[in-house]
């Protein structure tokens, strides 16, 4: 019991430290600035961006793809690890579920920012054409949102009930809210049965739904004729990219949460070691697909392909391309092959680099292709031959990233970031095993 | 006495002032130049049909040609005795118009069998009045279709309607009526022979709606006869086959014609998955009720 | 006690499943209802009316297309506008041997559609496949493809393919996602990134037959709407008056031919040819045939050129296709 009390004390949500308040205020500030920029965009039109008729999609879309990719972490950390019955996943699943929910929610919002006529949003439902990949997107995103919510909520119920009791004396209001959200969880046999069955179903569901989500995201590009997009490789390429982005985000967030909540006893170096190996696996698979996507076309060197590859390898986008490939892919693989590289601090930097590189990788996927269409770019102002996001685009994009971080921050603040009930059960099991030996 | 003379002088002077004013006004009119209107008239006669005059009114204002819209034009038939008014026509927004008559019998020719038409524009604030003259003789075209050695031919004979005399050396166009411009058949110049006849072969395989072709035999803007058209409706066209995919279920159809495969499988998947999601939400409900 | 629990559980499951079923069916029913209420019927009245245009041409018009002078609700017309003229398939032929970049086509198109942006709908490209092959001027419009990629990807049916071959845009439906622009391989679509300042257009709209400021897919750009896509429409507003599209009439060199493929006839206003013969004699081809878009625009190769390529260089402006007022 002493152990259990300690467990509870360690894992129960605590009030924000000063740093936490500053962090949250900073995020809110960034969001407010972004909202102001967006209102300006609504009034003046998307002319406030630097998108024009050739670079017709820009960082709003690449940001959207980034959010969709990161949301894959739920499928990985919960479903794949569960299917392979990796016991070490327990402390990290809740954070993974939180990241997934935040990412997919922001993906839905980000794509609406790119619509030039958001006042006609309902047309997407009333006049929906099933033939269009965007309609498939409109269907899959709410679906994935619902499933990832359920993936977070079902396992949360016992923990919410525990927290209700925990705060009964110290914070009665908090206790009341936890109680309401716990849906009268008593741990009864009936409830447990329903919950176990539901978790099984939802964990099974999130993997195919997650795969379909990444596939449809890729098909938004590969259902066009454009060179650099018209690739049969795109769907698995995006899936493996999502694997990388998701695990990278997971590592980064886990490091920060572990540090600020002093959870070193629960998320140990073992976990980082395992996550490091998982990230290495993800990067190796992603590297394989990158080779197929970028190296192989050099063999036949079709004119259009060569133009595209030239801009990436030696041309205007070369610095970015090599940064995301070497910095975001090759270096992580090399560093993580060593045990020292899989220690928490180096892992944090690797994870952060992977996330940043993932964001810029999607920029490298979206923009260069648009700037070398089939017919030459003529008859338009010189500035239309280039694209770099405008101030409005940056402010709005930062706001969406801040909003995602804010959702994660709020959920981490109020929810137990490590499943209490499950951890307790596992510790009990270990105790009984030890005692019976 | 002197005062009376003075008064009369003043009185007469006063009477003269309006005339001076009048003279002044006239001078102003001379200075204010009105533009002149050019009328292009094309006389058209349809065999066994009506006759009409296509009018185009233009004016050169500031070195540019402009359409003159919304002006009234009065048509007259000038016979040896008289100037008979035929009617009135107003140009449209593009300065064009058409004045129709039922047939040529509405007109009277002069002693030389020439029909004389004059068109009056009475002028307005902007434009000067003008009269345009047009003269033409009547001619008949008898056109028919025949088939020889599985080639279709159109034969057309031009005759003087009064004497029946043939009209040789006339340039005739034989063309198929199409949506925008007609498709010419035969040589660049098809000339009538001594018997006033011209024979033109019709090319094979020309498509027509329901296999129908409208063939026009046209004497186009001749100096003597104006434009005369004979129309033959010939069922010798190739049937038009509509290749449009509008009625089919395709990937580019509107949503009421979605391909069946897309309609069935994705919907089954969606309903299955959302069925499970709804079931799971119900489970939450069940847990809270327990 | 247990039996009661089992019974209540059973009852619960029963209620729950029933509720779930009703929700699902209700959901399907509601969505079907919504679809029906807003569906475009694909019927047209079938009645034809013979009308005489102001220059004396007799045309046949579907009677549902004839609008009275007072305000007609959009609903009545929209199905007919989306279906187009029956038994027609409009095509264009561009004779590259005659084009010398006079750009009168572009100027006329810009003027008649009140194009005020920075990207014209009709662009004359300076083309040269490789250093060994001849350079030439290539006017491109929307190709009005028979397998239009743009229509396939539109999520809201804002762009559509008609029976008569035209691909048009409903600017009141477009949500501005620009997927159609991404899908088009001919880069022919333009976007209204800001409020289009078409100043004088309001005058034209007031004087026009419609008398309404309603945008119609059949006269693109009248007016252009912020946040939506625009492109060449093959001028259905002219076709309905028996007139050729503006670019065809404006070209001083007779480069553009236009007509109905089912009539096998195209004309540039002066010369009229049988389409099949023209394509056969002059080896006509289509742009990017290998992509399978089935465009409605044919090109005649630049052989036996009437003019030198260099004569067009003077008019060439790499960075401008729409003249702006000083």
Image (spheres, rainbow, N blue to C red):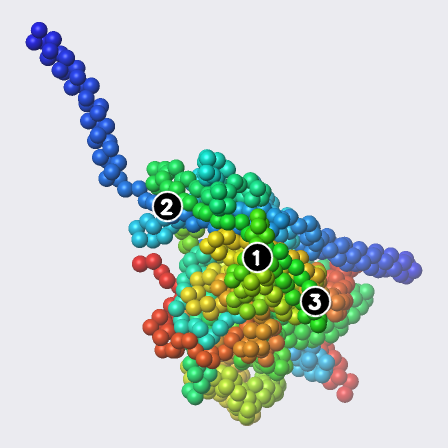
Foreground of the two, C322 or A128? C322
Q: Chain of mark 2?
A: B
Q: Nearer the viewer, residue C191 or B31?
A: B31
Q: Residue furthest top?
A: B1
* For residue B62, side relative to residue A326 (left or right): left
- In percent of width and height, residue C62 lies at 64, 51
Q: Which residue is mark 3?
A: B147
Label 3, label 1: how many angstroms apart (C-alpha)? 24 Å
Which residue corresponds to the image point at 56% horizontal and 64% vertical from the top-left? Answer: B193
Is disc 3 surrounded by few (<14), some (14 to 19) or many (20+) residues within 10 Å? few
- Residue receiving disc 2: B37
User: Which element type, helix, strand or loop, lies under badge 2?
Assistant: strand
Comes first in the chain, label 1 or label 2: 2
The residue to which callout 1 is attached is B166
Please report contact status of discs 2 and 3: CB closer than 8 Å, yes or no: no
If the image is split into quadrants, where does the N terminus of chain B sit?
A: top left
In the rendered structure, the answer to whether residue A314 lies left or right of residue A330 reads left
Q: Quadrant of residue C218?
A: bottom right
Q: Chain of mark 3?
A: B
| Residue positioned 59% across, 86% down in the render | A289
Tag 1's secondary structure?
Answer: loop
Query: In the image, A293: left or right of C132?
Result: right
The circle on residue A49 is none
């Amino acid at each position: 019991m002493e152990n259990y009390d300690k467990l509870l004390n360690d894992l129960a949500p605590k009030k924000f430290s000063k740093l936490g308040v500053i962090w949250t205020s900073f995020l809110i500030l960034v969001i407010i600035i972004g909202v102001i920029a967006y209102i300006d965009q609504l009034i003046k039109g998307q002319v406030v961006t630097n998108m024009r008729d050739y670079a017709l999609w820009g960082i709003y879309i690449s940001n959207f793809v980034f959010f969709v990719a990161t949301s894959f972490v739920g499928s990985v950390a919960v479903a794949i690890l569960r299917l392979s019955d990796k016991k070490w996943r327990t402390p990290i699943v809740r954070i993974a579920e939180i990241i997934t929910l935040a990412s997919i929610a922001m993906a839905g919002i980000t794509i609406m920012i790119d619509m030039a006529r958001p006042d006609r949003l309902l047309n997407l439902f009333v006049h929906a054409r099933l033939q269009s990949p965007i309609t498939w997107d409109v269907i899959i995103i709410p679906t994935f949102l619902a499933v990832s919510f359920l993936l977070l909520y079902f396992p949360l119920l016992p923990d919410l009930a525990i927290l209700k009791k925990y705060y009964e004396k110290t914070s009665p209001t908090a206790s009341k809210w936890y109680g309401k959200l716990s849906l009268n969880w008593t741990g009864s046999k009936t409830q447990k049965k329903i919950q176990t069955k539901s978790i099984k179903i939802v964990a099974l569901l999130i993997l195919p739904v997650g795969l379909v989500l990444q596939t449809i995201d890729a098909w938004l590009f590969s259902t066009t004729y454009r060179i650099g997009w018209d690739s049969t490789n795109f769907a698995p390429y995006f899936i493996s990219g999502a694997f990388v982005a998701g695990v990278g985000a997971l590592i980064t967030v886990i490091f920060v949460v572990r540090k600020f909540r002093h959870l070193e006893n629960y998320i140990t170096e073992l976990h980082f070691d395992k996550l490091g190996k998982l990230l290495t696996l993800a990067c190796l698979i992603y590297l394989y697909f990158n080779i197929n996507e970028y190296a192989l076309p050099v063999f036949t060197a079709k004119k259009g392909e060569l133009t595209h590859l030239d801009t990436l390898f030696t041309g205007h986008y070369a610095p970015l391309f090599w940064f995301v490939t070497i910095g975001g892919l090759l270096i992580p693989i090399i560093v993580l092959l060593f045990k020292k590289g899989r220690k928490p601090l180096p892992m944090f930097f690797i994870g952060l680099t992977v996330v940043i590189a993932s964001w810029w990788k999607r920029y490298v996927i979206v923009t260069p292709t648009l700037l070398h269409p089939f017919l030459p770019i003529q008859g338009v102002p010189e500035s239309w031959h280039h694209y770099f996001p405008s101030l409005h685009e940056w402010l709005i994009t930062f706001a969406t990233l801040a909003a995602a971080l804010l959702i994660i921050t709020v959920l981490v603040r109020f929810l137990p970031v490590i499943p209490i009930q499950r951890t307790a059960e596992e510790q009990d099991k270990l105790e009984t095993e030890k005692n019976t030996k | 006495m002197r005062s009376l003379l003075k008064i009369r002088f003043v009185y007469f002077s006063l009477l003269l002032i309006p005339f001076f004013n009048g003279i002044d006004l006239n001078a102003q009119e001379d200075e204010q130049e009105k533009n002149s209107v050019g009328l292009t008239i094309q006389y058209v006669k349809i065999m066994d049909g009506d006759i009409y005059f296509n009018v185009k009114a233009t004016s050169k204002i500031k070195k540019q040609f402009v359409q003159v819209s919304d002006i009234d034009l009065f048509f007259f038939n000038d016979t040896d005795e008289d100037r008979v008014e035929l009617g009135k026509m107003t140009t449209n927004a593009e300065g064009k118009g058409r004045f129709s008559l039922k047939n040529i019998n509405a007109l009277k020719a002069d002693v030389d069998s020439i029909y004389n038409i004059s068109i009056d524009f009475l002028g307005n604030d902007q434009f000067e009045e003008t009269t345009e003259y047009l003269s033409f003789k009547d001619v008949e075209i008898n056109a028919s279709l025949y088939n020889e050695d599985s080639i279709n031919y159109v034969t057309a004979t031009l005759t003087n309607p009064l004497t029946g005399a043939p009209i040789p050396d006339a340039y005739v166009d034989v063309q198929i009526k199409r949506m925008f411009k007609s498709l010419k058949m035969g040589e660049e110049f098809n000339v009538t022979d001594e018997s006033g006849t011209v024979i033109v072969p019709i090319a094979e395989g020309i498509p027509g709606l329901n296999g129908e072709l409208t063939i026009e035999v046209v004497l186009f803007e001749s100096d003597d006869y104006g434009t005369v058209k004979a129309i033959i409706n010939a069922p010798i066209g190739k049937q038009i086959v509509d290749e449009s995919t509008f009625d089919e279920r395709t990937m580019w159809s509107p949503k009421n014609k979605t391909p069946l495969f897309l309609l069935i499988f994705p919907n089954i998947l969606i309903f299955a998955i959302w069925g499970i999601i709804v079931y799971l939400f119900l489970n939450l409900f069940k847990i809270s009720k327990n | 006690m247990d039996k009661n629990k089992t019974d209540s559980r059973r009852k619960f499951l029963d209620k729950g499943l029933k509720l779930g079923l009703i929700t699902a069916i209700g959901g399907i029913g509601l969505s079907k209802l919504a679809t029906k209420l807003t569906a475009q019927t694909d019927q047209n009245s079938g009645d034809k009316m013979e009308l005489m245009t102001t220059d004396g041409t007799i045309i046949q018009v579907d009677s549902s297309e004839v609008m009275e002078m007072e305000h007609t609700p959009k609903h009545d017309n929209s199905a007919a506008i989306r279906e187009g003229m029956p038994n027609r398939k409009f095509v264009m032929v561009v004779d590259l041997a005659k084009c010398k970049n006079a750009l009168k086509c572009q100027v006329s198109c810009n003027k008649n559609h009140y194009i005020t942006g920075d990207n014209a709908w009709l662009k004359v490209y300076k083309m040269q496949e490789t250093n060994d092959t001849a350079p030439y001027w290539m006017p491109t419009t929307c190709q009005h493809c028979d397998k239009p990629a743009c229509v396939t990807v539109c999520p809201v049916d804002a762009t559509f393919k008609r029976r008569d071959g035209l691909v048009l845009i409903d600017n009141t439906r477009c949500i501005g996602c620009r997927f159609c622009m991404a899908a088009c391989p001919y880069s022919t679509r333009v976007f209204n990134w800001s409020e289009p300042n078409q100043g004088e257009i309001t005058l034209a709209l007031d004087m026009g037959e419609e008398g309404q400021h309603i945008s119609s897919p059949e006269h693109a750009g009248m007016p252009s709407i912020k946040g939506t896509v625009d492109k060449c429409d093959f001028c259905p507003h002219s076709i309905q008056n028996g007139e050729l599209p503006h670019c065809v009439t404006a070209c001083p060199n007779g480069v553009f031919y236009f007509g109905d493929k089912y009539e096998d006839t195209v004309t540039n206003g002066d010369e009229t040819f049988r389409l099949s013969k023209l394509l056969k004699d002059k080896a006509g081809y289509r742009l990017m045939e290998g992509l399978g878009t089935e465009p409605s625009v044919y090109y005649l190769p630049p052989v036996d050129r009437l003019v030198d390529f260099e004569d067009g260089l003077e008019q060439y402006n790499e960075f401008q296709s729409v003249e702006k007022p000083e």
